Image (spheres, rainbow, N blue to C red):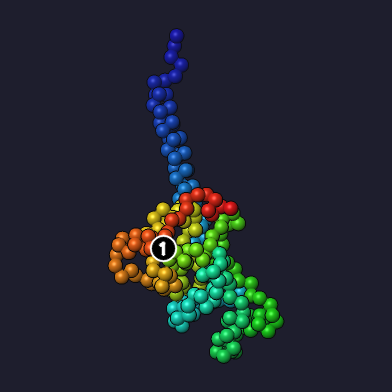
Amino acid sequence: MPQIFNRSANVVSKVGIVGIALLAGGLVGLLIVLGRSSYVTRAHEVVDQPLQFSHLHHVGDDGIDCRYCHTSVETSSFAGIPPTKTCMNCHSQIWVASPILEPVRASFRDDTPLRWIRVHDLPDFVYFNHSIHVKKGMGCETCHGRVDEMPLMMQDQSLQMEWCLACHRAPEQFVRPRSEVFTMGYRPPVPQSMIGPQLVQQYDIRPSMSCSTCHR
């Protein structure tokens, strides 16, 4: 019986199989990389707001504490978005005629809230409680980055589940003294490898790895 396929067909088939496997692997790898990219996570992307509020100026230059505006961060799951009257505590006295602040004055005058856009906007199926993280010594900077260096607010981290789990699995790498939770640019007085385990024990940090902790 004559040979139907040429001897080279064996080589072609092997190369084809390997090529398909490499292509499939490359596509999977590309999807993984894309899923972690800022294109998907929106990390380091400035979000348009009703007016250009600079944390660099208010926090970095003026030294305003996070809690002055985000009043419920220590007691609630939601850190809180400041009402217009919080802005007017200062701006009824300074920069009272600044054109850029007219939306603030109009909001206060008309009793109409400013429509701030949430930067760190988790999906509805994710539950996050600010107060418990503050009580356990997790600094604002750990999640939100150097807010005091941001002229316009942006998301500093990916906020993906693997990022959250990295902290839940090794909280000793991130915990800081409660007195330093709101400190920007905090550096531990001793190596984190020494103070971290001590604080985990002192604050009784036992982060849950159960799905229902965050997905309720």
Left or right of 86? Residue 59 is left
Q: How many marks?
A: 1
Question: Quadrant location of the N terminus?
Answer: top left
For label 1, count other residues whose C-alpha is less than 10 Å away and answer few (under 14), some (14-19) or many (20+): some
Please name the amino acid that badge 1 sits on. Tyr
**Can see residue 47?**
no
**Can see residue 94?**
yes
The residue lying furthest to the top in this view is: 1
In the image, what residue occupies the spot 55% across and 89% down? 94
Give the percent coordinates (x, y) of residue 183.
Answer: 41, 73
Q: Answer above or below: position of 61 versus 163.
A: below
Left or right of 108? Residue 159 is left
Out of 25 and 5, give the one closest to the viewer.
25
In the image, what residue occupies the spot 44% across and 72% down? 182
Give the percent coordinates (x, y) of residue 162.
Answer: 46, 52
Out of 187 and 1, give the one closest to the viewer.
187
Out of 163 and 134, give the one closest to the viewer.
134
Q: Answer above or below: position of 98 versus 163.
A: below
Location of residue 76 by image quarter: bottom right
In the image, what residue occupies the spot 51% across and 73% down? 152
Left or right of 213? Residue 192 is left
Q: Which residue is mark 1?
A: 203
Q: Answer above or below: position of 185 versus 23.
A: below
Give the percent coordinates (x, y) of residue 124.
Answer: 60, 57
In the image, what residue occupies the spot 47% across and 43% down? 28
Q: Secondary structure at mark 1?
A: loop
The residue lying furthest to the right in this view is: 110
Give the percent coordinates (x, y) of residue 22.
Answer: 42, 38
